[in-house]
Image (cartoon, helix red, strand yellow):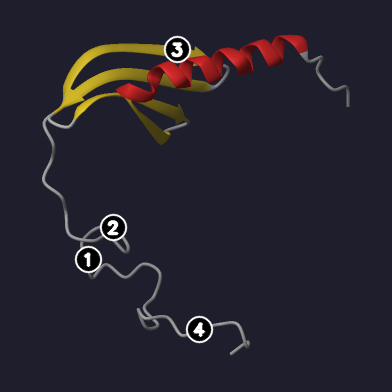
């Protein structure tokens, strides 16, 4: 053992240990939360597909942004109170992108 390594509290289980269900290292399943979809839009940019869904559940409203690249999906959730700040920051990034010339390789 290297001096800065510590023994794992989980023992030496193999990576694909299915002791907690179908997913590796998954804890107990949470019950599904009821979500109402208020608006959805899809955009294709190069080989990526983005789906933006404004949703609402008992905890409040939120924007779910899902990126799909060849069947692999990643999701970001932004609570509704942060949407204005998110838009302002996105506007700044768009402006910076337009003002900054691309680097030549």
Q: Is residue 72 above or below residue 92?
A: below
Left or right position of 89 against 35: right
Q: Residues within 10 Å of mark 4 (few under 14, many from 20)?
A: few
Q: Nearer the viewer, residue 7 or 78?
A: 78
The dot on residue 43 is 3
Q: Nearer the viewer, residue 53 or 47?
A: 53
Task: Name the residue carrying label 1.
Answer: 20
Looking at the rendering, which quadrant does residue 92 occupy?
top right
Q: Residue at x 20, y 18 (%)?
A: 37
For marks 3 and 4, give the CA distance. Answer: 46 Å
Quadrant housing residue 45: top right
Q: Are marks 2 and 4 in contact (CB under 8 Å)?
A: no
Above or below, comparing residue 1 to residue 35 in the picture: below
Report which residue position mark 2 lands on.
23
The quadrant of the rendering that contains the N terminus is bottom right
As drawn, is 80 to the left or to the right of 29?
Answer: right
Disc 4: which residue: 6
Residue sitting at x 40%, y 32%: 76
Measured as percent of width and height from the top left, residue 8 is found at: 42, 80
Reading the chain from its start, which is encountered first: label 2 or label 3? 2
Q: Is residue 61 above or below residue 101?
A: below
Give the secondary structure at mark 2. Answer: loop
Q: Find numbered disc 3 in the image and state the secondary structure of the residue it sits on.
A: strand
Q: Position of residue 83 (x, y in %)?
A: 39, 19
Q: Nearer the viewer, residue 93 or 8?
A: 93
Q: Nearer the viewer, mark 2 or mark 4?
A: 4
Q: Are marks 1 and 3 in contact (CB under 8 Å)?
A: no
- Relative to residue 98, is residue 2 drawn left or right? left
Q: Secondary structure at mark 1?
A: loop
Cα distance, mark 1 to mark 4?
24 Å
Q: Residue at 28% across / 17% down in the picture?
A: 54
């Amino acid at each position: 053992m290297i001096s800065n390594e510590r023994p794992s509290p989980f023992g030496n289980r193999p990576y694909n240990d299915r002791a907690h269900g179908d997913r590796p290292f998954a804890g107990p399943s949470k019950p599904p939360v009821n979500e109402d979809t208020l608006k959805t839009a899809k955009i294709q940019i190069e080989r990526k597909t983005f789906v933006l869904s404004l949703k609402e559940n008992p905890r409040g409203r939120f924007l779910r942004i899902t990126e799909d690249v060849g069947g692999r999906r990643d999701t970001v959730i932004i609570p509704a109170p942060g949407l204005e700040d998110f838009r302002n920051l996105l506007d700044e990034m768009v402006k910076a992108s337009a003002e900054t010339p691309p680097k030549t390789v």
